[in-house]
Amino acid sequence: MRAIYEFRCKDGHTNERYTDSECTHISCLDCGKKANRIVSAVRSKLDPISGDFESSTRKWMKNREQKLQLERKANS
């Protein structure tokens, strides 16, 4: 399976490459030395509307209700 992986060489250069999952090292794009694949943190954002995160869902509902009230006032 192909995906984007991060690789780091001994000089500390970090590069991303779209490659096969079996690939464990590449040539560094900056210095040409061997760069090994590293495990990097995944960027994610929790969905407050799903209901799985109650405090976020309550905050969203409160903000939404306030916005609706302001819109109703403006339209009256």
Image (cartoon, rainbow, N blue to C red):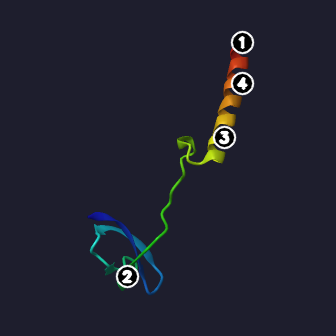
Q: Position of residue 35 (x, y in %)?
A: 37, 82
Q: Quick one: label 3 or label 4, which is nearer the N terminus? A: 3
Q: Position of residue 20 (x, y in %)?
A: 27, 69
Circle 1: residue type: Ser
The residue identified by callout 4 is: 70
Circle 4: residue type: Leu
> Quarter of the image containing the C terminus?
top right
Secondary structure beneath dot 4 equals helix
Secondary structure beneath dot 2 equals strand
> Quarter of the image containing the N terminus?
bottom left
The residue under the point 66% across, 25% down is 68
For the residues marked 2 and 3, what is the alpha-carbon distance in whole angstroms?
46 Å
The residue identified by callout 3 is: 58
Q: Quick one: label 1 or label 2, which is nearer the N terminus? A: 2
The residue identified by callout 2 is: 35
Total of numbered circles in the picture? 4
The residue identified by callout 1 is: 76
Name the mark on residue 31. none
Q: Around disc 2, counting alpha carbons within 10 Å, would you say few (fewer than 14), some (14 to 19), or many (20 or more)? A: many
Q: Are marks 3 and 4 in contact (CB under 8 Å)?
A: no
The residue under the point 29% across, 68% down is 19
Viewer-proximal residue, 36 or 59?
Answer: 59
The residue under the point 36% across, 76% down is 29
Q: Are marks 1 and 3 in contact (CB under 8 Å)?
A: no
